[in-house]
Amino acid sequence: MVVLGLGVSACGDASGNAAAQGANGLATEASVETAEAGEADLHDLNDFLNFADPATCEYSESFTSAMESAFEMNEDPNAAPIAGPGSVSIPGIAEPVATQMSRPYADEGSPEVIEYHLDFEGRWLGLHVVGYENAMIEESCCIWASGIRFDEPVGRVTAALIDAGYPVNPDGSERETPMDDAMRAVTEVQDSEGVTVFYCNQVFEY
């Protein structure tokens, strides 16, 4: 009886395990199919994230024009130029994307330093894009922090960029490309808080 009991118990465990494994397998397949369907739904960002010259990190006129609405500007000439965050219209996205803006060094006496980013999704160069970021000095210019965010590993991003003609190192490390006596293109691909960021900027030497 004991042997029979163990046998029945064993058969019951095996059946239960098989059923659980089957259910887990179906759930995994469904999750993969859902993820693949989501990836397939990502719209093309080529009309927004584009460069006039990838080799020199020169963004296109259409991109720079679209980004002009990223901030609300003050009409008062005596006030700081930027009144607050604005929004950017991106082809393929129904609603304008709100700018997330901060002045991270205001408490340290440097309120003119602004960091901002846009959260959106799409596909560019076959890669899953999740946003754009930059930083600037108010009443001046950027501080060479223009970056495209990806939900992809660094190696995949660098490979796609190299194939597209961007001057990046395979490991994502910083790379400088001379443009003239006073300017150079600087690129870097790095993991930043769970996302991969492609930095591509024109840097002036003073």
Image (cartoon, grey):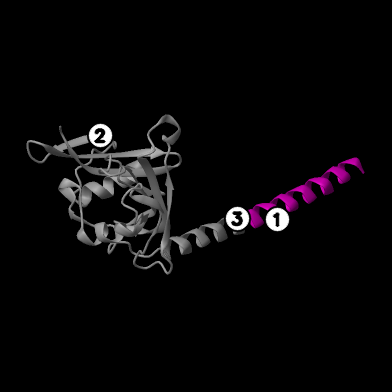
Pointer 3 residue: 25
Of the numbered discs 3 and 2, the one sitting upstream in the chain is 3
Res 200 quadrant in image: top left
Residue type at tag 1: Ala
Q: Residue at x 39, y 52 (%)?
A: 83
The boundaries of the magenta stretch are 1-25
Res 99 quadrant in image: bottom left
Q: Which quadrant does the C terminus fall into?
A: top left
Q: Residue at x 25, y 43 (%)?
A: 140
Q: CA distance from mark 2 to mark 1?
A: 52 Å
Kindly report which numbered mark, 2 or 1, lies closer to the viewer in this rendering: 2
Horizontal side, residue 128 vs residue 46: left or right: right
User: Can you give x and y, in whole percent of width and height, for residue 182 in the image?
Assistant: 10, 36
Q: Is residue 181 visible?
A: yes
Residue 174, disc: 2
Q: CA distance from mark 3 to mark 2?
A: 43 Å
Q: CA distance from mark 1 to mark 3?
A: 10 Å
The reply to whether dot 1 and dot 3 touch (C-beta < 8 Å) is no
Residue type at tag 3: Gly
Q: Tell me the element at label 2.
A: loop
Residue 7 part of the magenta segment: yes
Q: Tell me the element at label 3.
A: helix
Residue type at tag 2: Glu
Pointer 1 residue: 19
Horizontal side, residue 158 vs residue 9: left or right: left
User: Can you give x and y, in whole percent of width and height, for residue 197 in the image?
Assistant: 35, 44
Residue 205 part of the magenta segment: no
User: Can you give x and y, in whole percent of width and height, for residue 104 in the image?
Assistant: 43, 37
Q: Residue furthest right?
A: 1
User: Can you give x and y, in whole percent of width and height, for residue 96 in the image?
Assistant: 41, 64
Q: Residue furthest top?
A: 108
